Amino acid sequence: MAKLLIIDDERAIRSTLREILEYENYEVDDVDNGIDGLEMIKKNDYNLVLCDIKMNKMDGMEVLETALGIKPDLPFIMISGHGTVETAVEASKKGAFDFISKPPDLNRLLITVRNGLDRGSLVTETKVLKRKVSKTRDILGNSDTIGKIKETIDRVAPTEARVLITGANGSGKELVARWLHEKSSRADNQLIEVNCAAIPSELIESELFGHEKGSFTSAVKQRIGKFELANGGTLFLDEIGDMSMSAQAKVLRALQEHKITRVGGEKEIDVNVRIVAATNKDLLKEIEDGNFRMDLYHRLNVINIHVPHLTERTDDIPVIAQSFLEEICGEYGMPAKKITDGAMEALKRLPWTGNVRELRNMIERLIILSDKTITEQDVVAFANPGGGTNVGTGHQSGNQSQGGGSFNYDGFSNFQEYKDFAEKEFIKFKLEKNNWNVSKTADDIDIQRSHLYSKIEKFGLKRAE
């Protein structure tokens, strides 16, 4: 049932409108002045507001402007006994959905209300769909560090300041970048992402700045680079610490002059792009080692947001785990499974080398392999899917090793042999988990797809018939 608010200083009008709308099964509140109306809007989730223009205490146009500053998508229908074209135009410019004159025509009123409610629903649905497409989920957690990150995003997003996001792989740096874009004035334009670690050094400049036809052997046609694609929006440079020195110099020039030149071209192209960068490396150490430009570092690091490791905020794990649980069960079309307090405590004790990304994979594994309720025993059993007595073949025995457990480390002649074995088993497990989708597996374990193909060939891995 839609909830409506009427703001009008004439009791007769309020009573008439309320009677008509309640007869149509709408839930209706009414107040006789704009100040109280704004307080009601702040405290309640209304689907639509009908507001008089000429009122005591606060003018209806002022109510409209103030309310849309609080809830920008709230449909407003302005009503007035002195309706003119100029008034209607002014109301529309200030964000009103429609304008009707007093005394309101019954049919016109109901049609306008229905249209206003439909418009509000479409705006909400559009935002939800946009959020799904953009993969922007909430930043979950109640810890002080997460609260500080959210506060920083709220402060920094509306500005044009460049942001450098630091943190370990899988900690959520990309999510912070998406929220910086979502809450910025550039949100209606594109967020373009570039993973600098996934692009070979000889191609990174073409990827960022584009190239002209014939500029190099495989340049069979002109290509638009990411800087141009992100014009008016945000460019997210992920793993910036892996960018080549020559590309760094060109990025620095683009930041300084707001101009780029395509590879093989001479024309300078103006670009209006906000840069957000992320890295899992210590850039100051990279500067010392001669792998990163100090001047570029200072250009990028106007605002620094550090995303903590999951082990530094274990109190957030229950909130994140529960969210993943509901999300994944929804994707599988099954009722959300319950997870016991003991299981949550067991999750908090794990090392989480893969951070939040690993936690999501763990929850998905537990959903698939456990019964209706996920217990502490399930977490212990499935926390190390490659462990136990079925890790591999040829290096396993029933005897206890000197280090404890049921794994026979004496079966390996040297460290490299053990490393190759562990790497092979890890990749094999991940490929089977992802039904041998190489692209998804490469993303899952955070390596380049070409690198994964090389590993598959090296270890002779084949999909089971």
Image: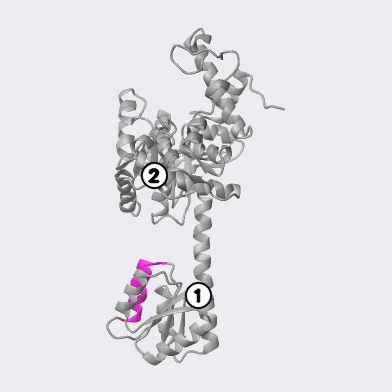
* Span highlighted in magenta in the image: 59-72
Residue 180 lies, in percent from the top left, at 39, 49
Mark 1 is on which residue type? Gly
Task: Report the residue marked by disc 2.
Answer: 275
- Neighbor class of circle 1 (other Cα within 10 Å; few <14, some 14-19, many 20+) is many
Mark 2 is on which residue type? Ile
Is 223 in front, or is 204? 204
- Neighbor class of circle 2 (other Cα within 10 Å; few <14, some 14-19, many 20+) is many
* Above/below status of 84 relative to 294: below
Q: Which mark is residue 174?
A: none
Residue found farthest to the right: 465
Residue found farthest to the left: 57
Is 265 in front, or is 46? 46
Q: Position of 24 compared to 242: left or right?
A: right
Is 5 in front, or is 188? 5
Residue 421 lies, in percent from the top left, at 54, 17
Residue 94 lies, in percent from the top left, at 39, 74
Colour theme: one colour
Q: Position of 339 compared to 313: left or right?
A: right
The quarter of the image holding the C terminus is: top right
Task: Report the residue marked by disc 1.
Answer: 116
* Above/below status of 160 relative to 355: below
Can you see residue 73?
A: yes
Quarter of the rendering containing residue 343:
top left
Could you tell which of marks 2 and 1 lies nearer the N-terminus?
A: 1
